[in-house]
Each structure stands twice: as C-alpha cells, then as structure tokens.
Image: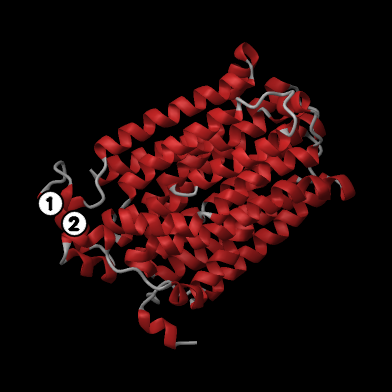
Amino acid sequence: MRWLLIFWIFMLSAVAYLDRVNISIAGASIAAEYHLTDVRLGYVFSSFLIGYALCQAPAGRLADRFGPRRVIALAVVWWGLFTALTASVPARLGGALALLICIRMLLGAGEAVIYPASNHFVSKWIPTTERGLANGWIFAGVGAGAGATPPLITTIMIHHGWRAAFWISAALGVVAGAVWFAVARDNPERHPWVSSGELAHIQAGLTLEAKGAEQAPSTRSRGPQLPWRVILKSREVAAMALSYFSYGYVAWIFFSWFFIYLARVRGLNLKASAIFAMLPFLAMAAGSPGGGAISDALTRRLGKRSGRCLFSLAVMLMAAAFLASGAYVHSARLASIVLAGGAGSLYLSQSCYWSVTADIAGNSSGSVSGLMNMGGQIGGAVTASLTPAIAAAYGWTASFLVAATLCALGGLAWLLVDPERLLTEAESTHP
C-alpha cells in the first residue's frame, strides 16, 4: 500500500509540474498576445516561484500539523483554480501583466504544499532505508510531468489555443487530487488496506522520532514539532538549503527557458523544439528514481554519509560538467542531448535532499524540507529572471556556465552535512 500511495504522489507531482511548466511552452504565445518582452515574461515566471518559495516553510508546518491527506487535497483544488485563472485574463485588460503576476504568485503559494507534505508522508510511511527510492519516484513525477508538457501543451495549442491547454491542465489536477483524498491516509495504522506484515515492516524501519510517535497513534500525524530556532540553527539545514538554491537555479533553466532557448537561440521549429525540450525532463524522470535506488543501496552498504552526501557531491559535479560542455556544442540536437545529461545527473541527487531531511527531522520533516525547498525555489526565481538578463548581456553560453558553477558549489555544500545528526531540542545548545 505504501508504494501505491507513493505512485499517486508521483502522479500529483507530474500534474503539479504540468501546471507550472505549461506557461513556458505557451510563453511565446502569451508574450505575443500580451505584448511582453522576455524580461517581462521572466517576471511572470519568477512570480510563481516567489509565491512558491515564500510559502514553503508555512506549507510544511501545515502538513506537520494537519497531515498530508487533507493539506495536499486542498492544495490541488487551489492550484487548479489559479491555473484556470491564468488563462482567463483578457489580453486587452489594463494591468494584465500585474494581474498575471498576482495569479501566478498565488498558484505558487498553492503548489508550495506538495513536496513538504509528501516528505511528511514519507517520514510516516517509508522505512529509512527505502526513502531514497520513494523520494526518487515522487520526484520522477517532476520529469514525467515536465516531459509530457511540451508535446501535450503544443498539441492542444495547435488545435485549441493556449488558454484551452491551461483549462485542461486545471481539470487534470482536480481529478488527481480527488483520487488522493479518497485513497490516502496520514498514517499506515489508520489505513484499512495495510496488512499487519506491512505495518510491522514500516514501524521497524522508521527513524527514532517517528518511532516515538508510534506510541500515540491518535496524535502521530500531529506530533510535537521542533521550534523554528532549532531548525534555523542547524548546520545541516543551512547547508542543504544553500545547496538546494544551486539545485533550483539549474533546474529552473530547463523549466523556464529551455523550450524558448531551443526555438529562438538554436533555431529549432515548434515541433522539433517540443520533441527536444522533452529530453531533459525524460532524463530527470529516469535519474530521480535511479539515483534514489543507487543512494539507498550505497546507504545500506556504506552508510548515509556515502550514500546520501558523497553520492550527491559526485553527481552534481558531473551535472556541472555536462552543463558547461553542452553550452559549447554547435549542433542544436547534440547540445540538447548533452544538456539533458546535465539535467539527468542533477536529478540523481534529488531524493537525497528529501531523504536526509526526513531522517533528521522526524515529526518536523515537513517544516524542515519546506525550509530547504524555499532555498531551491528562490534559486529558481533568480534564474527565471537572471538567465535572460545574462544571455542578453553576455550570451546564452554564459548563462549555462553560471549555472554549471553554481551546480558545482551546491555539490560541495554536501560536505557540511552530517546525515546521522538528528534534530532535537538539544541542538539549540550546540554550536
């Protein structure tokens, strides 16, 4: 049952990225209709990420307090509404740009729930040695949703226009959220479909904090949360948030600008751009569960330091190398493949971030992972606006070289993380 629910979070993750990446595919049409420059279009892209980033920590706290089942279901309805509203702004309306920015910011606020709440779910349902694979599948939804977006949105746009593509995206989200609410439960002992053998396996593999909560099932999803002062003083949390800033900066080049980059800079037509724009997201979809499985295997064999931290360092350095080299490749199609290798390598490390935060934070895993994810989304917001500015001043090669440098620095930040150091009240007395 735990893997069935992880699969459905994978589906929700895919829909979430469909709802946020569709605007980059429709970006050229939106810019033409609303008379937006690339920089102003970048403001619209960034507004989603600002709302998303600012609400990460509060969203994680909500999931810790009320449980992921209700919080995710309500969030899906919220983001479906604002996806539909994005396509409802009249082109001739005065202040249309400001309204689009507000709508996208509120969409980001709603989507902020999905991954902190998912991480809380993982901390309650998934034994610690399986969390790499579980998180890998959850974030494979990022690649699957983003990868399906170019051909799906392009096809709908060709036949029905970009607004219809947004309305269809919104409807898919509401359906997926309704299924989640029907089948999910916050705790395995409350789910009628969980066998006694599976329940025993889950409880035996939980971290110390989660095991302690087992003694009080009625309050388990709303167990005691760590004070913010403890979380904010943690070296591990700070290092992962900074590293995830770099991660988000790199990832959002693909989510925000890669389709436009292929069409305008590399000269591919709409159909070819849609096909080759899928490659990074397919690499993400493969890299995320693959990296999770490798990380789990290394963790069981060599410990969490090697399986989570050193593994992430290695693959992020590899991603930096792909990004730097791909920017110089002359052939548009070959460059797409090399840069996709960078995206796939980056996503090999994805599950490690979320597995470590679930391991060290226990009942506060939503809050801690939300704070970490805030760093990632601030990085995304920066790249959504800064990437075209760097490209305009120095060329697109420079934009990718900046991303490669940040990716390498983000990998090195993993050297500061001790994945065995649990966050407790006592942490507030330690340096």
Q: Are marks 2 and 1 in contact (CB under 8 Å)?
A: yes
Query: Is residue 297 left or right of 333 when viewed as pictured?
Result: left
Residue pictured at 44% horizontal, 31% vertical: 173
Choose top left, top right, bottom left or bottom right for residue 93: top right
**SS category of the residue bearing label 2:** helix
Choose top left, top right, bottom left or bottom right for residue 359: bottom left
Residue that lies at the very extreme toward the top in this rendered image: 159
Nearer the observer, 280 or 164: 164
Relative image position of residue 429 (x, y in whole percent): 43, 88
Is disc 2 surrounded by few (<14), some (14 to 19) or many (20+) residues within 10 Å? some
Relative image position of residue 260 (x, y in whole percent): 73, 33
Would residue 357 be visible to someone looking at this image? yes
Task: Examine the rendered structure and indicate whether residue 18 appears above or below residue 124.
Answer: above
**SS category of the residue bearing label 1:** helix
Please give the residue where the numbered disc 1 appears in the rendered image.
197
Nearer the observer, 231 or 422: 231
- Amino acid found under the numbered disc labelled 1: Gly
Residue pictured at 52% horizontal, 47% vertical: 109
Residue pictured at 37% horizontal, 54% vertical: 63
- Amino acid found under the numbered disc labelled 2: His
Nearer the observer, 372 or 253: 372
Please give the residue where the numbered disc 2 appears in the rendered image.
201
Query: Is residue 377 left or right of 363 when viewed as pictured?
Result: right
Choose top left, top right, bottom left or bottom right for residue 409: bottom right
Residue pictured at 58% horizontal, 52% vertical: 346
Task: Examine the rendered structure and indicate whether residue 362 appears above or below residue 427.
Answer: above
Q: How is the image coloured?
A: secondary structure
